[in-house]
Image: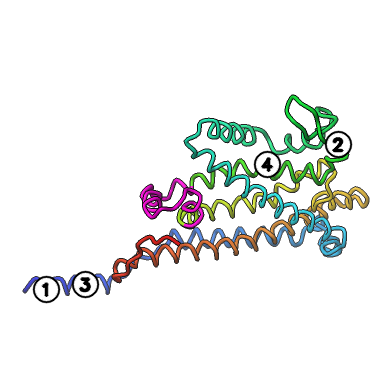
Amino acid sequence: MSGADTEELARRDVANAVAPPAYGRWLATAAMLLAAAWFAWVVAINPNFEWPVVAQYFTASAILRGLGVSLGLTVIAMAIGVALGLLLAVARLSPSRPLHAGAALYIWFFRGTPLLVQLIFWYNLSTLFPTVAIGIPFGPNFAVWNTNDLISPVTAAIAGLGLNEAAYMAEIIRGGLLSVPRGQWETAQAFGMTHSHALRRIILPQAMRAIIPPTGNQLISMIKATSLVSVIAMADLLYSVQAVYNRTFQVIPLLMVAVIWYLLVTSILNVVQGAIERYYARSEQDRAAAPARGVNLALEPS
């Protein structure tokens, strides 16, 4: 029998091979489904959850207003976090020692202190600085404001959430920039691009594959972190729920309203994040397959 016949028989054996039954996997799946069904049944029939009350308040105007506040805070805080985080990430990678040290100090402080403590400090900023002024350092002031007039629950929540998020986004973006091969920078410079032009048109688009997944996780975390602003009397979703159950004493059903809304919003964001990740993964697969098709993907300046 020739070598070709032997290889053909081996391929047929592989094609006709039957995997052994995965009894362990089947058993684990059945146990998980049984546990999930049991838990759902217990929750559904437990009268202490008061599901009619949950249905009554789920779309109440006060609850929906609180949800809108939470979503608005999330969008604003993430916008501040991404914009400031990008600047901090570039500063961390800068050859300038003062820029590098300043960005590192910012990230160290805001990542090293609890978000709740930061929110409380911002809300009580007037205790430390009764007035806020704009002027020349060690010189005259051009404008002075009362801190209590500037720092409301809204501004304290935006400042606390946005500045804290910037520290985390800075590290995420820095990691994404470092994932791009150094040769891309050198090629961009060979084409005569400035550092900012190369960063915007060449480096960042490639770094997005590494930046998008953790950014999606941060967005989902931010939705949940907005619940902390209830301690500074910000009327978010949790605060609105608390205001209702403080009046009706129906604590558990009102908390379930908040839980369901948080789960619904984060589930939608998970779907969107998955779609974005698949898009960038497809782009990477196309780029990897291009050399096999004889396609030239040489870097071109724009």
The mark nearer the N terminus, 3 or 2, is 3
Q: Is residue 137 above or below residue 67?
A: above
- Tell me which residue sits at (51%, 54%) in the image: 200
| Residue 225 percent location from the top left of the image | 70, 47
Residue for badge 3: 11
| Residue 277 percent location from the top left of the image | 51, 61
Q: Nearer the viewer, mark 4 or mark 1?
A: 4
The mark nearer the N terminus, 2 or 1, is 1
Which quadrant holds residue 14? bottom left
The image quadrant where one finds the N terminus is bottom left
Which is nearer the eye, 52 or 94? 94
Which quadrant holds residue 116? top right
Direction from residue 139 to residue 273 in the image, left or right: left
Label 1 crowding class (10 Å Cα cut-off): few <14, some 14-19, many 20+?
few
Residue for badge 4: 163
- Is label 3 in contact with label 2 (beta carbons under 8 Å)? no
**Magenta part, dominant SS:** helix
* Element at label 1: helix
- Is label 4 in contact with label 2 (beta carbons under 8 Å)? no
- Is label 4 in contact with label 3 (beta carbons under 8 Å)? no
